[in-house]
Image (cartoon, helix red, strand yellow):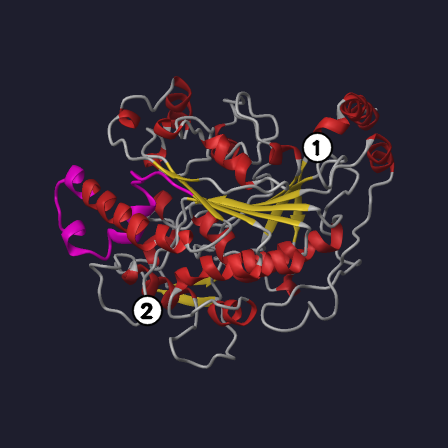
Amino acid sequence: MIKVLHHATLTLAAGALLLSASAQAEPGDYGFWATLVNLNSPDPANAKVTPAQAQGMYPLTLDDPGFDDSFDPADYDDWQKVDVPANSGAMCGNGSPYKFFVYRVPDTSNTIFYFEGGGACWDYASCSGQAGIRGARNPNGIPDDYVQNINLLDFQNSSNLATAAVSPLIYTHHPYNQFKTGEWNLVYVPYCTGDIYVGDKTEVYSDPSGENPDLIWHHNGLRNVQAVVSWAKNNLQKPKQMVAAGCSAGSIGALLNYSKLRQDMDVDYGYLIDDSGPLYRAPLDSSDTDTYPSLPLHHEVLDSWTTFTPGGDPDAENPINMLSKITPGFDDNELASLYAALSNKFPGDRLGITHFLADGNFSAYSYERFHEDIYSDPDPDSQLQKLRQKWQQDTFNNLIPALEQTANWGYYFPMYRDFNDSHCTTILDLEYGEIAEQGLVLKDFLDNIVNYQGGAMIRAYETDPVSDFENNHNWFYDLVGGLL
């Protein structure tokens, strides 16, 4: 009876949708009758992994009808856990099974892949969980009910609030900020490897105190993503429109995986939203950390998470060599060359990057451990100002000029929001991301990127250093922050 009522409700919703279908329908949306058919007989996958895609560096996995992934294709408008077969090579950093979550809808094939944010790790403290929120997310693996109860207004279930608050991009029933991708098929890619979804290396980290045994940690993010993409191709309709998005570690994960994800999914319209996970220019053969403040970070993560060595064997299997082979124009000496390479490989796609210019979180990852003038400064306020100075230097000198050379990268850089260290523009809500001097709000930028009709890219940054610090907060931020 519950299932019948659920489908009846969806049928009524489909009927209401029919009244304005001509005005609201986009590529990938189903009509009224197709939606009704889907409710009773879900469309099968129509672009399964091919034998050719199951070969080469970081291959996809062929469909295995004998494996029980726990997914019910007729269970619409509900978060479902999807188990991953061990032979896919997927696992969390601690070696536990990888799993992800899907929210399927009956009235569109359009799909968003959302890469979860949350820290990074390259030593014992940060990978074991001792470092807290700035270390690896989910160091003990992914719980089965990780996103089952997403509801911003369910304050009694605060254990899931961090996931519920993540973004209107995937929160279907956000109470005051809706975005159209929240009504699409949602593929939530959890983060449990501490390697921004690009790692492929097992490390042994020793406890510096000597009190605990060595930690064997699997930086396995890239193979996990291949398992997710394999499942999507083997189980869902091929989307007409596809978004890859994330915040922080998730956004740079979406950026670094976009070339292969977009190639494998082969959709009609592709979009990328990189929220607060930039790749700044930092040539690996340079030693000029004054000009390229992110240079030490790039060396650290490549060494910790991959087997790539500059000038090494170009045929060795590692994430950087894979990117080089499938993305013409990507220079393995210059990770930020990926922006132009993606633009050239997918000239019809719409690609966007956004972050706050006063970010105090990703900037700390980028510079705090690597620049003596920052980590030796005993004054937290002075330290934060130095982080922001380098962040803005990197943004204006080592990012914007590269984006300006492309035809289809948009950017949107407001100044500050008093939530989450002014980190990530699209989490919790879309408020306080305005650039008032240009008459823009954050949703204008998102609408500009996820837009199959094309048009000029929005490119904007805030120059007013004062106003955002005066109007940047509401009571809901206090409530959510307290529960988190």
| Residue 359 position in % (x across, y down) | 31, 40
Give whichever of 483, 49 is nearer the camera: 49
Q: Secondary structure at mark 2?
A: loop
- Residue 284, numbered label: 2
Circle 1: is it few (<14), some (14-19), or many (20+) Cα within 10 Å?
A: some
State the image coordinates of residue 382 (x, y, percent, origin top left).
15, 40
Give the x, y percent position of residue 347.
Answer: 57, 55
Nearer to us: label 2 or label 1: 2
| Residue 27 in the image: above or below residue 280 | above
Q: Which mark is residue 77?
A: 1
Give me the residue at 74% from left, 70% from top: 51
Q: Is residue 126 magenta?
A: no
Q: Which residue lies most toward the top here?
A: 475
Q: Is 239 above or below relative to 124?
A: above
Percent across and percent down for residue 8 are: 82, 23
| Amino acid on which disc 1 is placed | Asp
Q: Is residue 67 above or below residue 133?
A: below
Instruction: Tell me what residue is drawn at x 52 percent, y 68 percent.
Output: 328
Q: Amino acid at mark 2?
A: Leu
**Start-end of magenta stretch:** 354-383
